[in-house]
Amino acid sequence: MQPDFNLTGKLVVIVAAMFGFGYLLVPMYDVFCELTGLNGKTTQTAVEVTESVTDRRVAVEFMATVNQNAPWEFRPSVSKMLVQPGKLYDTTFFAKNRTEQALIGQAVPSVAPGQAAKHFQKTECFCFTEQKFDPLEGRDMPVRFILDPELPAHIETVTLSYTFFARQQLVAETSVIGN
Amino acid sequence: MSHTADAHHDHHAAPSGFKRWLFATNHKDIGTMYLVFALVMFFVGGTMAMIIRAELFQPGLQFVDPGFFNQMTTMHALMMIFGGVMPAFVGLANWMVPLMVGAPDMALPRMNNWSFWLLPVAFSLLLSTLFFAGGAPAGGWTMYPPLVLQTGNAFPFLIFSVHLMGMSSIMGAINIVVTIMNMRAPGMGLLKMPLFVWTWLITAYLLILAMPVLAGAVTMLLTDEYFGTSFFNAGGGGDPLMFQHVFWFFGHPEVYIMILPAFGIVSQIIPTFARKPLFGYESMVYATASIAFLSFIVWAHHMFTVGMPLSGQLFFMFSTMLIAVPTGVKVFNWMATMWRGSMTFETPMLFAVAFVFLFSIGGFSGLMLGITPADFQYHDTYFVVAHFHYVLVPGAIFGIMGGVYFWMPKWTGHMYNEKLAKIHFWLSAIFVNVTFFPQHFVGLAGMPRRIPDYATQFADFNMVSSIGAFVFGVSQLLFVYIIWSCVRGGEKATTAVWEGSHGLEWTVPSPAPHHTFEVAPEVP
Amino acid sequence: MRERFRRIFQGAVYGPLFFLLGVSTAYADWELNMTRGVTPISHDTFDLHMIIFWVCVAIAVVVFGVIIYSLYAFRLSRGAQPDIAMVHSTKAEIIWTLIPIGILVAMAIPAAETLIKIEDTRAPDVTIKVTSYQWKWHYEYLGDANDPFVKSNFGFFSNISPESNRARQLGSGIDVFQVDNYLRDVDKSVVVPVNRKVRLLLTSNDVLHAWWVPELGGKRDTIPGFVNEMWFLAEEIGVYRGQCAELCGRDHGFMPIVVEVQSEADFAKWVGENGGAVGGGPAETPDVVEGTVAAAATGGGAGSAEPVDMELSFDDLMARGETAYLTNCSACHQLNGQGLAPAFPALAGGVITTGALDAHLDQVLNGKAGTAMAPFSYLSNTDIAAIVTYERNAWGNSTGDIIQPSDVQAAR
């Protein structure tokens, strides 16, 4: 009839493990996203590819968004391209710092539909690193991409969207709004 | 932990005054404190609900500004879930589980004390934010980023109070599991335990598995806000949606944490007043366990509209619909228990019968919400508000009220005022429907939830709903009066209290003495 | 008021009855059921909703029927004797496990079929990028020379209409029943062609929102940093109204969505009037288009077409400024200019609004980095001139300054 501290101890271990599991969900989620294309996340590192051109034509749309009204101009140089899966293409996005201070930003890619995400491969992208801009500097930033020929046949249009985020510190300061 | 190893039950007279409560280790005292605390929070959260319904009485903004309205909806949910329903269930478990399994007390009485006293601290922290310059949290009880990161000074208080509530629940749950697994009287086999004990055992495991995940999720929010991590910030490589996944991984088991003990209470009450054993006891246990298991694989049905792969939508739709099966088994078993019984309708039975009807309505709307394409229309509308209030108010809260009326004579030694209690029941049962049934209609007609003001085509049903809410709210004062007068006096309760009562808790005198089952009872 | 109570009484009596009969009532205000909508998906969704509803009703009739009969027949006061031996029946338990499973599988099949249709965003005729802001929507029509309707990008913000916005202020004293489409009206609607597939690409500037017009079927969240897709094909010309459906902060209830479905000809005309190139011969530079400029769109409202050298009187500027302020500024700085401490400073007696004019104009045009103050350079010169004039002369700010559109142009 005395309490069993063995069981209590086990339960405490389970609690600690579940707390850890909460954190484990983070990398699990990333793997899950990669497998399923949830959210249209693409890989954030350059891939090695070899071209193997197919006859298919797929439309690629480009979209640019600035987060939290950050003081950037940001737009795709070309709004739409007709591409052949398996072939490398280059395009650029134009960004301009509209302030008289140096700014650092990070572009975050997202692809719609989500299943296309893992087939949208980039060998070069301004989104791989943070981008620093001098006051009032504007420049074209390159993306080199290839659509994997494995892209599911029912996909006819792929949208590549970049959202430009000001560096975190700036975001943190803007955060007290709205309640 | 070792210092609690010598925890024993003091045989000297119980300390009097505030020390009796502050240093309480007796399961009955702690149970009472939990129940009183839950009742206070029920009224605090209820007052917020009244403010919400007053503002929604008519279109246009009459009383509060939209920011304050959002604080009210957020705080109402936090108060009711973490302050009202969960502590009330823990309070009932504290009182009744040792009595039902023939144990002298909870297994870990000092931790029991601690887990209770964390709650007033947590809620004082949370309620204090109402007086801050930026106001209380207003991003919804679901705390979705990025919105919740705009909370302002109340933010760390929100996170810290959720941590404390979580710790309290986890400790309470550990205590209950250890009590049930180790403190049962000889002969009280697992499959002889009353169903309330069974449902609480499963609930406690759910708490142990789910609450730490919530703690992890809100900790990530905290470090995102103050320590430069980017779990949920897309700009830093994170994803705001991941919070929803982690949150609902906790959140859906949480839904069952708030209903399984009510299933248990109803499964005690109905056989008592039908004078007939519970039908399908074992299938009830298995159904409860299946619901608990399924609750961990359905979370994404709360977030169908975020855009997920087709395969994900199909999986979560099917798994969600599956939950209807064990839930249906429970309802059918209650139905079969009443069939060929010999029923009387004292207040606990009235609440239990209303529970079966009205919870089923909440279950039906839940089934509808599980159909993903239809959910794209229902999601985040008043249809959802109607759904979860049907499972929580005439579900969880009617379960608690039924339990309180059922066991109060055992706690106080007096019968409550049956006539007033029946009035309380009928007012509650009628006006809970007046309040929440029309919300199905406005939701289907397109009124989103969490809005302080609405288009004029929703005006009439909202007025009906508000009138229902006001009467329901005022009726609950009667509940307090009935409890108060039952504590003060009344007809003496017998040991068995009810004609059809069955179980160890009905073998101790009424009121239950401070110490019970110091010698393990014989289990028949 | 009495009239409303009478109608409420009627509704309370007839409402549930009509609902159970599945009949839609004659009272528009007593709308009981989901809209059938005007798109194939909304029709499918409605049908699924009705099937599952009737399934639930059927189960309820059986289960509740048995319980109600028991409550009547098996009561002590009628001398019922409990059948204590009745504790278990494997047969019954298997039956009431299998029947629900069968029903659920039967339900899941049509639901899955509809889901597959919903996910098929292929071959749209019009693509619109929807960006949510606290608390307004931005629409950008994406076009190129090969598109059937929209040959170049153009976009605009869509705010709650000034009439609704005035009436919804706390204690406004305005009878909201007299406001047309209260809270469901905007200053500029989205226009789409009838019987054409419209695809939306949804993202957000700040927090989560959700785009929802019930008649067009379903909603979709907008998520900062990510792009979501949905589509609809409206089969009837008309105006369809909805609103944001995901809690997005203080003014969540005040960001309506209005979609006007027009004939193809009317739509083409509307596109032309709003800055998008339409129809005609082959465009010279099909792929290279203006694109978005920062948070704003290229095309402004009608105001941007106004000549820069226009001179307005103080009273005209103040009147226009009041409305433009209401639409663009009042969500944060409040209609009375008092702001909301601590995030949104008061403009009444504010340092900027009563200080140097250049700094004021600069802040409105370019925003203030590191704060919630967004750049409003996408507004027309006239609107900005009116807003700045208004801010410098309202609520006891009596600088007496008059700002003309040409001043704004010079400051750009």
Image: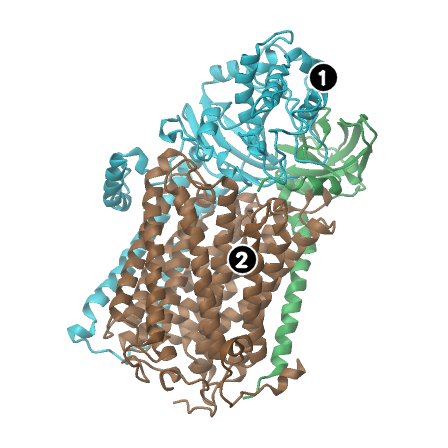
Chain colours: A green, B brown, C cyan
Q: Is residue C191 left or right of residue B245?
A: left
What SS does tag 1 mark?
Answer: helix
Image quadrant where one finds the C terminus of chain C:
top right
Q: Chain of mark 2?
A: B
Displayed quadrant of residue C172 = top left
Q: Position of residue C381 (x, y in %)?
A: 63, 15
| Label 1: few (<14), some (14–19) or many (≥20) C-alpha neighbours in 10 Å | few
Q: Is residue C123 visible?
A: no
Q: Residue at x 61, y 64 (%)?
A: B212
| Label 2: few (<14), some (14–19) or many (≥20) C-alpha neighbours in 10 Å | many
Which residue position is annotated with label 1? C411
Specify the label residue B251 is tagged with.
2
Q: Position of residue B289 (x, y in %)?
A: 48, 69
Single out the residue that lies furthest toward the right. Answer: A134
**Of marks 2 and 1, the one in the foreground:** 1
Q: Residue at x 64, y 45 (%)?
A: A37
